[in-house]
Amino acid sequence: MKRILILGVGGFIGSSLAAAILKRTDWEIYGMDLTSGKLDPRVKANPRFHFNAGDITICREWLENQVRLADVVLPLVAVATPNSYVTDPLRVFELDFEANLPIVRWCAKYHKHLIFPSTSEVYGCCSEPEFNELTSQLVTGPIREERWIYSSCKQLMDRLIYGYGCHKDLKFTLFRPFNWFGPNLDQIVDERSNQELMNSSRVVTQFISAVQHGCSLRLVDGGKQRRCFTYIDDGIEALLKIIENHNGCAEQQIFNIGNPDNDCSIERLAEHILTLALDYPKVSEGLARARVVPVVAKEFYADGYADVDHRVPSIEQARTRLAWTPKVKLLDGLRLTLDSYWDR
Ligand code: UGA
């Protein structure tokens, strides 16, 4: 039996991970988040699930004590939406880096297995066709391109954790999600009545919101840029293997967790969502009004935005060390996601 501490347990990854752990293992979960809205009622009711509503920047005493008692620690709290990188970069630093730093240090102090979410964004605009954890260059842009604050914070944290691993015996695993998507990724927003939340989601939710509310699916700079969309269940499968850590297979490792077979342009993603939406009577009115329109990046986001034109993971590390391969095809994952919002 393992005792798992998940900070940000109410978020997209945390809530799915908690459900999978309780269903598939005998592990015990201790979790903190500001809210528990995304958590399944069955998770909340499970006696092996212990939830504490709180803010990781405030509840320091509780946190240190929980790290001390845990076997494995997953600090998942972070701002991870590109719009925030350019509108509130200081908050990205404060939460993603500063607030997580003491947790990393406590893991080193109490000799806990730290499983930290790095990101595909650390590769930035690397020109290599496929990004490799051990050899790829990490390439960002000039300081005025504030988008790179997230990538930079995560990269610095990766380097720090690696340093603690090499010089202070910290047991760690860094995992890099590549555009994980699925139910509960971000909030569905009607941007006509919620102007301040406009552009606040990642692209899959952004397009789902647009169809639901009959708004525009906006293709930033025409939508030729590509991402490898990875269904949440595949990501969670990898995380379970990392936590399990059979024969130490995940220790002192970095893993890209993405689906290279789901490499798709944003323009094509919009077409897929529009086509799939035809099967959902619930959104037929919105769908009839929805239009695909190109927009200029710096107008859609803000001046400090920069984009990544391709992002394909090498997943050899995860394949060989974790015996993991992603299984869910893009269209199947999109259908499961739409089902969760618009049941047929
Ligand atoms: C994301 C976020 O930074 C993080 O969630 C995460 O760490 C990482 O990448 C990941 O999940 O791998 P990005 O892929 O750029 O970054 O995020 P999205 O907002 O999903 O955008 C994907 C692409 O779609 C971008 O090129 C963006 O410009 C475009 N986009 C986004 C549109 O064309 N229209 C929209 O309405 C929204």
Image (cartoon, rainbow, N blue to C red):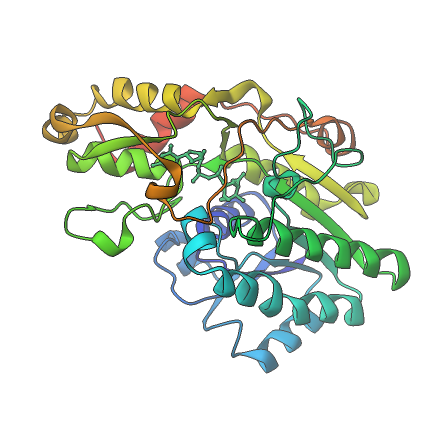
Specify the farthest residue to the bottom. Answer: 61
Asked if residue 31 shows in the view, the reply is no
Q: Is residue 301 above or below residue 160?
A: above
Q: Nearer the viewer, residue 40 or 270?
A: 270
Drawn side of residue 164 relative to residue 208, left or right: right
Q: Nearer the viewer, residue 182 or 90?
A: 90
Which quadrant is the C terminus positioned in? top left
- Which residue occupies 73% across, 31% down? 132
**Residue 201, how many percent across, how many down?**
36, 45
Q: Nearer the viewer, residue 158 or 329?
A: 158
**Residue 35, how many percent across, how many down?**
38, 64
Drawn side of residue 190 relative to residue 264, left or right: left
Q: In which quadrant of the rendered view does residue 280 lie?
A: top left
Image quarter where ligand 1 lies: top left
Drawn side of residue 28 relative to residue 180, left or right: right
Specify the farthest residue to the left. Answer: 285
**Residue 219, how many percent across, how many down?**
34, 29
**Residue 315, how many percent across, how many down?**
69, 28
